[in-house]
Structure formats: structure tokens, C-alpha cells
Image (spheres, grey):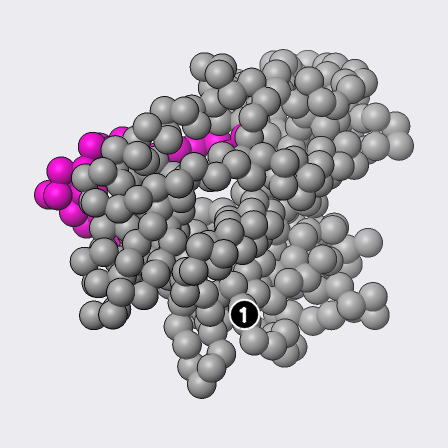
Amino acid sequence: MANNKRVVVGLSGGVDSAVSAYLLKQQGYDVVGIFMKNWEDDDDSEYCSSNIDFVDAAAVADVIGIEIEHVNFAAEYKDRVFAEFLREYQGGRTPNPDILCNAEIKFKAFLDHAMRLGAEKIATGHYCRVREIDGEFQLLKGLDPSKDQSYFLHRLNQTQLSKTLFPVGELHKTEVRRIADEIGLPNAKKKDSTGICFIGERPFREFLNRYIANEPGPIKDDRGRKIGTHVGLSFYTLGQRQGLGIGGLKEKGAQRGSGEHQPWFVARKDLATNTLYAVQGHDHPWLLYGSLHADDLIWCAPHAPALGRYAAKTRYRQADAPCTLSYNDKGELVLAFDDPQWAVTPGQSAVLYDGEVCLGGGVIASAAAPNATPA
């Protein structure tokens, strides 16, 4: 038993954090719940559900028999996460704000607040695990491969890992839902949240349009032919298929099935000429990359990884891709992949793994086609 040590759990209103709190209470911890409000703009809209989520979190706390506190981190979020999110988009990159939110809010502002409440540890409903070996901490993948969230937590440091518990990391999602149903949690069947935390389920372009000026420009194909008009480079990401507003280009005399009806994908953005390039076919060479450079490196492992063989993800829910790690003379991470990777996107995170151990990673700065060196 935990001898009544205090653990502060981030209750989001979802089932994963709810079961996390229940499991910790069963283990004998003095559990306190905290609901984090991280976004205030248009919070009463149909897309932002923080009020509903708080009601769900409070109902969970009541069933489990723990106290819950409502804490507002909206100012910290706007300064540390949202401002960076906008800077990246304005620079033509595609950031991952959920990763920054974890590092800056959930495991920094929230952790600091929990320590002021006398907590020894914090806990969240993320699907990952922490292992301690000789005073050093490893971030491990969650045991449910379809729910593993270590990718989002790779920027946590040793101090943060040492103070964090992930109770559902040892479970599969089906088991978490079974426990929630068994103990009568009101959110046992609540669907998983999707979308960026502050945007929710709203149309992304509509949201971004409020904060970033749009400058329309040409959409061109891989031969330089104009095939449409984009609404602003910031509103597109590499590999994007929907929302391009272009149909198939038919070659004179082309036969059906020859490729002219294949879907279009965003392949490149040229900020200097405000040109968006799109190509037809999922496996077009412009969408395949053999290597990348990453900067802004953060290692959750005790030490930076040595040169050698690892696996990496360049986007969430991607299979681990075998690669060779090196560093260039700028100190940037260089990953050379065994097999070409699809739509490697500047601004997203490249996260490194050694088996089930997440080592950390960096922000993708550039990528190169197979057998080429990224600029």
C-alpha cells in the first residue's frame, strides 16, 4: 500500500484519467483531483467543451470519493504554447501543440501547483510507463500498442519523470473501459477526445484564420503547371489530401486508370514565392524522404543517445521506423531511415526509440529525398 502519500491526478473529464484516479485510491494513495482549464477564448462555443468536461470530472471525483479543484492555466498556456504554435505556422511549419502542452503545462505548471498542495507525485491518464533503474528514469511505451502516447511525452525531463505516475500505462483500453463500467463511473462510455486541445472539433482553417493573415497564391503540380489557388500557406500541411479544391488533371489522350484520377496531396511549400505544390498519388517521389535533420533536441533519457541504430517516429500513430542516428556540425540530430518515410513534415517531432524505451527527440527542421542530404 502507498501509506497515504498524496498524489494529485489531472482529471480531464475522460475515462483514462478517471480510472487512473480510481486505481491510485485503491492502492492507498491520498488522491486529489485537479481539472485544468487551459483555454478561455470562445469557451462557450459549440466546439470547446471544457465546461462539460469539468462537470464530468466532478462527477467522477464524487463517485471515487476524492476532492477536485478547478485550476486555470489559460495565461500560461497562451504564453508558452499558443504563441509558439502561431509562430511556427506563420513560419510555414506544422507544430504539434499537444507535445508542448505536456512539457510546459501538464508537467510543469500543473506539477508545480501539485507540489504546492503537498503532493509527492502527480498522475495523468496517458498510456505510457516510467521505469526507475539505479536512480535514473526511463519513459516506456504503454502496453496497449494502439494507444501508446510516449510520442507526446518525449520532452519530459528526468525530474518530471521521477514525480509522475501513469496508472493506465500497464493496461489496454478495453480493460480501462471495463473497470470504469464495473465501478459505475458516469463517463465509462464517453468517447475519446480528438483534435488539438484548444481547437477541439472545430474546422481548423476557420480557427487559424482568426489569428493568421491569409495570403492566397498559386497551387502548382510537379511540372510547374498552375492547377489551383491556395488560401495561405499556413493553412496546409505536407501530406494533406482534403481541402485543396482541385480535381484530377487529365492529360490529352490519357486512359482511365493511368493515374489522372489519383488524389492530390500537398507536397511542398515555397515561402519565397508563396507557392503550394501538390502531387498526385500517395507514393509520389516528392512525398518520400530518406533522412531528416532535427533541432531543439530534448532527451527524456538520462543521457543523449550515442551514434548508432535506433527506431523513430516522425508522426503519432506511425510504426517505428528503423534508422541510423548521427549528429551534424551544428549539433542537429540526423536520422537516416532504412526505408523512405512518408510526408516528413518540418515542425513536427522526430521521436527516438530503443525498443520500448522512448529516448526523446527534436523538432524536424528539414528532410531530404532518399539518397540525398537534407539542407
Out of 311 and 64, give the one closest to the viewer.
Answer: 64
Q: Quadrant of the N terminus?
A: bottom left
Vertical position of residue 296 compared to residue 344: above or below: below
Magenta span: 171-198
Out of 149 and 119, give the one closest to the viewer.
Answer: 119
Residue type at mark 1: give it.
Answer: Gln
Left or right of 6, for residue 171:
left
Q: Secondary structure at mark 1?
A: helix
> Where residue 353 sits: x, y (%)?
51, 66
Residue sitting at 63 percent across and 41 percent down? 76
Out of 108 and 304, give the one closest to the viewer.
Answer: 108
In the image as oriented, which residue stretches furthest toward the left? 182
Residue at image mark 1: 158
> Where residue 342 sits: x, y (%)?
58, 45
Vertical position of residue 335 compared to residue 109: above or below: below
> Where residue 325 sits: x, y (%)?
64, 70
Out of 81 and 308, give the one closest to the viewer.
Answer: 81
Residue sitting at 49 percent across and 79 percent down? 136
Q: Quadrant of the C terminus?
A: bottom right
- Is residue 174 visible to the viewer in this orientation of the structure? no
**Is residue 180 in the magenta section?**
yes
Give the dominant element type of the magenta stretch: helix, strand or loop: loop
Residue sitting at 21 percent across and 63 percent down? 27
